[in-house]
Each structure stands twice: as structure tokens, then as C-alpha cells.
Amino acid sequence: MASLWGTLVLLCGVVFSAAQQTKSNVPRLKLSYKDMLESNNLVTFEGLATSSAYHTFLLDEEKGRLVVGAKDHIFSFNLVNISRDLDQIPWRAHTSRIDECKWAGKDLMRECANFIKVLQPFNQTHLYVCGTGAFHPVCAYLEVGKKIEDSVFRMEPQIENGRGKSPYDPKLQTASMLIDGELYSGTSADFMGRDFAIFRTLGLHHPIRTEQHDSRWLNDPRFVSVHVIPESDNPEDDKIYLFFRENAMDGEHAGKATLARIGQLCKNDFGGHRSLVNKWTTFLKARLLCSVPGLNGIDTHFDELQDVFLISSKDLKNPIVYAVFTTSSNIFKGSAVCMYSMADIRRVFLGPYAHRDGPTYQWVPFQGRVPYPRPGTCPSQTFGGFASTKDLPDDVVTFARGHPAMFNPVYPINNRPIIMKTDTDYQFTQIVVDRVEAEDGQYDVMFIGTDMGTVLKVVSVPRGSWQDLEEVLLEEMTVFREPTAITAMELSTKQQQLYLGSDLGVSQMPLHRCEVYGKACAECCLARDPYCAWDGTECSRYFPMAKRRTRRQDIRNGDPLTQCSDLQHHDNPNGQATVLDKTLYGVENSTTFLECSPKSQRALILWQYLPPNDDRIQDIKAEDRFVRTEQGLLIRSLNKMDSGTYVCQAVEHGFMQALLKVTLEVIDADRLDDLTHRKDEAIAHMAHSISRDTPPARESPNQKHWYRDFLSLVNHPTLNSVDEFCEQVWKRERKQKRQKAQQAQQVQQAQQVQQTQQVQQTQQVQQTQQIQQSQQVQQAQQVQQTQQIQQSQQVQQAQQPQQQQQGFVHAHTHTHAHVHAHGLASKWKHLQERQKGRNRRTHELERAPRSV
């Protein structure tokens, strides 16, 4: 009963939406940063005050470490828990380089530092690391040990030049991979950031790069990632694939546009003999398309390539490519994920080549003769019989130099994105994919990072076939305290953990949180999470090898009717969700609110009404008096016919379950007038009792009924709107606050008065004690003086008989002595009289002691 008061107060802050939000493209669960911490599903490293930009990750599953490159530091985290066993190495730029960077007009904090851009395994004991070095790239070797027990993490003193390995500007992206002792990197090679190239450095061979200052090869690119993919069983045929975005070539696109690219290189390319010396001879590039067909024939393109993830299958030659795109338009803001197959990519690189010809000098497919061996073919015994690219004919090298681009683009699987977001305030930045074994097959679970510090967990579910995929957005989780772009992601299948990097720090979260879905079989099945299944007692981690008869999971359909119907029919308390029962009271002609919000954001709410003494359930339809919101049901202008039971039903994926049952009782307005009058009389009686300093009389049962319950359940019958009721509540609260403030002020003043009186009493006591002490000192002095006088008199009386006896015996010889003794007696008598006079005067005048 008492819960209606809180419900009505909460109603004052409810914002009513004009239309219900669509449920098809929202995450089923949305967990805030606080929810993640409280559920122990998030571990964070807040970062150092002297560091930032935790953007470069290297995951080492064997040693159980995550190496992170940041500003002026290299960190090594424990994969089990990043907050434990942390190692770090400071690696700052040289002081002279920092001064030169500052003199060049660069920002001292954001640019003139050593930002780590390259972290690659060099051998079993060392890593190869490179940084910007305050616009002077440097590289070094980092010793990490061969085994976990070695516990080694230190920098070798040898420093190398990092040009062609790391960019000068920390704002520029770089992509690198170290293969067989050789570093393949796409980066800028000059201070101004204009000379972009794809390099191969280190190793025993001469460094090699792309053609310089030729926009047909690279046109202001931004590199994303580098991958090696075998072409056949012969290692000589292995190719290096680079993913990047660049400006469109002249005549390729109307206006200035950014296009997503994929480039290929042969691993055994050593450049040409007379042309393209120390330059790539097998470089080709093609456009990656990710678009949505429009109704008017104009496609919506996502061309800003942000990240790429390759997930391998049993066939290592044909991994699936997941790519994250955003729009380059300032008007239309959106993100998408497209999926590509290696078969489609290889087909595009077979031709035709792009060629500029005709009167308009536009890009058209090349129709002439293509030299042999086909440009882009790796020299090996498999395809051509050439031992090296230096042995290639001159016409092949010349053709490759003038035709680096392919005419046809690479289309995604199903010719459309598998997930697309255009109505959100964030954009995709990173992606990792985990292939999970479920009860009805394998599923790819995507973890997508955004520029607002959130992670989306998405699973691709086939509709009719595995070629027609449906996105199911499972969760949206906030993993950083403040909104920040996620710039690095790594997934550990061994630890079942996800690691994320940003400017603020590093976060760690588990891949699955089965317990958050609920405590019922239906809720676990509706989640459609391949990691989780109902095991008979709870929603827990699914293991393919575990054989249980009570295990329930349905990722493709998510149908609890077929998975959990037998548990509900047998009244299994663990198989069905509990329904919350409430009883609320309302007043006739007033407004009330029934609160009911499902845990799942994809569920639709259906309200049903059961009249008293009637078994016929009625569906509540939206009308003037009933307003359905995402938080519950608002009933305007209650009447007696509204009494009854209201049932809140959640409908999701064709399954309906009851969440709440509310029994509403409507009170007559006339009865409320009588109760209000009785309340006023009771308050007046209580006030009179208090004024007489007598305790109020004990409440009777009837008084308790309306005073304890109805005062917290009903409002005034003349208030016909929520606004008026809220105004009444706010006025009452302000009055109570003023009264409390006045009472507190009175109590404070009384305490101050009491403290003042105590201080005055203490001062009076101290003064009295001082007077008493002074009087005691004076009395002691008087006693001492009296004793001295008495002693003098006794001495005088003792000396007089001696003087008389000596006078009779020796009168003729001591006449002078007798006269002297007589003078002493007179002197003592004079002193005695003088002392008596002083004491008499003091006693008569009653002078205060001199000490006082």
C-alpha cells in the first residue's frame, strides 16, 4: 500500500515520449560502467599521470602477458587480471629531440614525446618496438624471456633508426607485421607526413618500398592492418595483404572522396632488375565496397575503413575478413560491418586492371594484351617458373608500374553489411570476432568498440540459410569511466577475456556474463547467447562436451516455448520466472501510475486487465485515460470501474511472460473527504496536546488505518492533474525544509547560550579560588609576624634579670653596658607598640589584601 506514494512522486519526473522506440535494432541488455563494476565483470587500469595513448597491443597467450605501447612507456599486463603483476618500462625521447620538436612548432605534450607504434615478436625471447621519438622515429629490442618463469622485461641498450617503420607524427596510423625476421609496415617516411609508403625492412635483403610520389600507387593513405595469407601449399606463394583507406584517384570519383582499399604483395618480391629497382613489382590494390542499396538506385556507401579482423577456419588459405566502416559524410553519420571471403578477393585481383583511356581520360577496364606472367603473380615453381622478381621480363615490370589498381571492387558477402547503425550518437572503431560452438552449430560473436567507450556484443544468426544472416545485438557495455574512443582490442580465447585500450587506460572484461540474463529458463533462451545455456538450475556457460538432458539453448530461433515448456508444465520453480505481486490504492478522479519495465530492451510491454469477481481478461488499449510508456502504465482520472488486477506482460520473440501483477483499489472521493476531516481533527488534537506538554493519546486501530495508510496513499480529490499534485508535494517539501531549518537554528542558538553560561560560571569559580588563595597567604604572613614578635619579647624578658644581677655585682665596672641594655629594651618595646598600631589600623579600615 505504501508504495503508491513513491510511485506517484516518481511520476513527477517521468518524460512521456510521443512514440514508442523501435525494438528491432537496440541491444537486449544495456550495462553501464557502474553495473559492470558492481557485477565484477570489469577490471580497469586507469593509466599513469605521465602517460596516455594506450593504442598498441601485443597479445602473448603462451607467456600469459599483454604488452601495451603507450606514450613514453611500455607495459606488460597479466592476462588473468590486468590489475596484478604489472611491469613497465619508461622509454622517453631524447632531450635534444624534444627541444627540436618544440622549436618546430609542435605540441610539447601531445606530439613531442615517444608514442609507441610498433610491437612485434622478433624471436622467442625478444620483441621489436618502435616509437615516434618526438618526430624522430626510433626502434629497439625488448627482452621478455622464453618462458613464463623467466620474468624478464627489459630494454636492450641498442637503438636503431625508425624511419620507414614508425611514423613521425603520433596522430598518423601505422600498420606493421614482422614475418621471418622482416618487418612489413605501412607508414609515413618524412617529417611533413607526405611520403607514404609500404616498406619491408630488417632481414638480410635490401629495404624495399612502393613507388614514390605516384598517386596511382598510394594517394594519402591511412593504414589499418597487415596480414599474411598463404596462397597455396608452397610457402613461396604466400602473399601479404594490407588494408587501408586513401583518397580517390583522379577521375575515379566525382569530387574528393575517401575509399577503402585492400592491397597485395608477394613475400618473395625483391624488386626489378632495370625498372622498379628496390621497389615492389607485385603490388596491386582494389576497392573494398560496403554499401546499402537505396530505393532510388543510389547506394549509401561506408568508405572510411576503421579496423579489420581475420578469423581463421580449418582452411588457413580462406579466412573470413570482418571490416568496420564509417561514413565520410558530415551530414550522414553511420557505421557498418561487412564480411568478405578470400575467394572474392582473389577473383578481383585476377583482373581486369584499371586503365585511363578515351577522350574523357576516365578509368576503364584494360582491354589490351596482358604480359606473361600476369602482373601480381609471385615468382615460384607453382605459377611461372621464375626464381625471382629480378628475372621478370621488362614488359611485365613496366605494366605493373603503370597499372597498380584493379577495376572491379570487392563486394561483401550477401552484397550488404551484416550490421549497420545510423541512428546512434556513436561510431564503430574496433572489432574482434570469436567463433563459438553452440548446440545447433558454430556462430561468430562480434565485439565492436565505439568512439564513446562502449562495446557491442553481436551474433550473426542465419535466417533461412547460413548465407542469409541476421544480426542479434545482445549487449551494450560501457567499459571506461568517461566517454573515449576505443583504439585497440585483443581477444584471448584461452582466458575467455577481452582487452580494450584507449587514451585513458586499459580495461578487461569477460566474453560472457550468463548470470545477468536472469534466473529462469525462458530468460536464458531469449538471450540467444552462444556462450550460455540453461543447465537445469541456472543460466551458465555452455560446453559442447557436457552432455546433460536438461541443457536448453536455441540461438537460431530463441524460442522458449519449445525449450522450456516442459519445465513450466511441471511447475519447476527453476524453469519459470517469478511474478511480483503488488497492491496499490488510488483516489477517484485522481491519477495513478503502474510501474513495469522489463530487463530486456527488446521486449514489448502488454497490459491486461482482470475486473474483480470476473475471469475474463481484457487487453488495455491506448486511449485518453490510459497512456503506455516504457516505464509503465499511466491511468488518468480514476473511477470506481478501474479497480481490479492489472497484469504486465513482456512479449519478446513471440514469447509472453508475466512480470508484474498489480491489484488496484479505487477509493471514493466522499470517503476521502471524511478521512481528511478526521485527519485535520487529529492533527489539531495532537497540536493541543503538545502545547500543554502532555504526550498525545495512543492511536486507536481506526485512526491508524487512515492516518498510517491513507495519508501515504491518496491525494486531494480536487486535483485532476499530475502537475497540480506535484506542485502540492513540492510546496509541502519546501515548507518542511523551512521548518527543519528554523528548528535547527533554534537548537544552535540554545546551544550557544548554554555554552556562554558555562564559560561565565567557570570564570566566576576561578576568581573565587584566586581570592581565597590570597586571603590564605595574608593570614599566613600575619601569623608569621606574630610569632616573630613573641619570640622577641621572650628574648627581652630573659635578658632583663641577667642585666639586673650583673648590675648588682659589677655596677662599678659595667655602667655603660647597663645603659646599652636599657636602650635595647626600649627599642624592642617601641617596635612592639608600632606593630600593634599597624595591625589595629589595618583591622579598622578592612583593607583588601594587596595581592587582590
Image (spheres, rainbow, N blue to C red):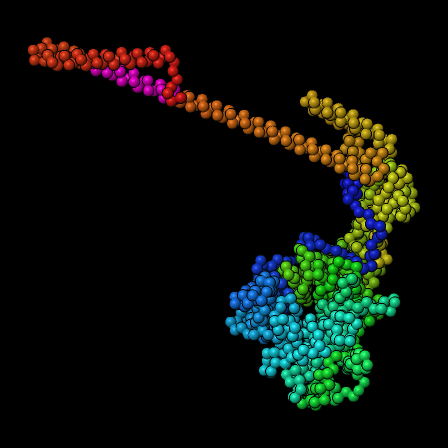
Residue 465, percent across and down? Answer: 84, 70
Along the line of sight, the residue nearer the viewer: 369 or 282: 369
Residue 94 coordinates in the image, percent (x, y): 53, 67
Q: Is residue 2 left or right of residue 82?
A: right
- Seen at 22% across and 14% down, the residue is 828
Residue 500 painted magenta = no
* Number of marks: 0
Q: Is residue 790 magenta?
A: yes
Residue nearest the viewer, comparing 578 with 624: 624
| Residue 573 vs residue 242, the one in the foreground | 242
Q: Give whichever of 142, 282 is nearer the camera.
A: 282
Quarter of the image with the N terminus is top right
Residues in magenta?
774-797
| Residue 254 visible, this orientation | yes
In which quadrant will I find the C terminus? top left
- Indicate the quadrant where residue 117 lies: bottom right
On the image, which quarter does residue 354 sit in?
bottom right
Looking at the image, residue 282 sits to the left or right of residue 528; the answer is: left
Say above or below: 163 vs 108: below
- For image coordinates 60% across by 67% down, the residue present is 116
Prevalent SS, magenta region: helix
Residue 438: x percent and y percent?
Answer: 76, 66
User: Where on the picture, by quarter, is residue 224?
Assistant: bottom right
> Residue at 53% of width from left, 69% of height from top?
155
Q: Residue furthest front?
A: 359
- Vertical placement of residue 116 versus 46, above or below: below
Position in image of residue 411 (x %, y %): 80, 74
Q: Residue at x 71, y 63 (%)?
A: 449
Query: Is residue 512 left or right of 724 when viewed as pictured?
Result: left
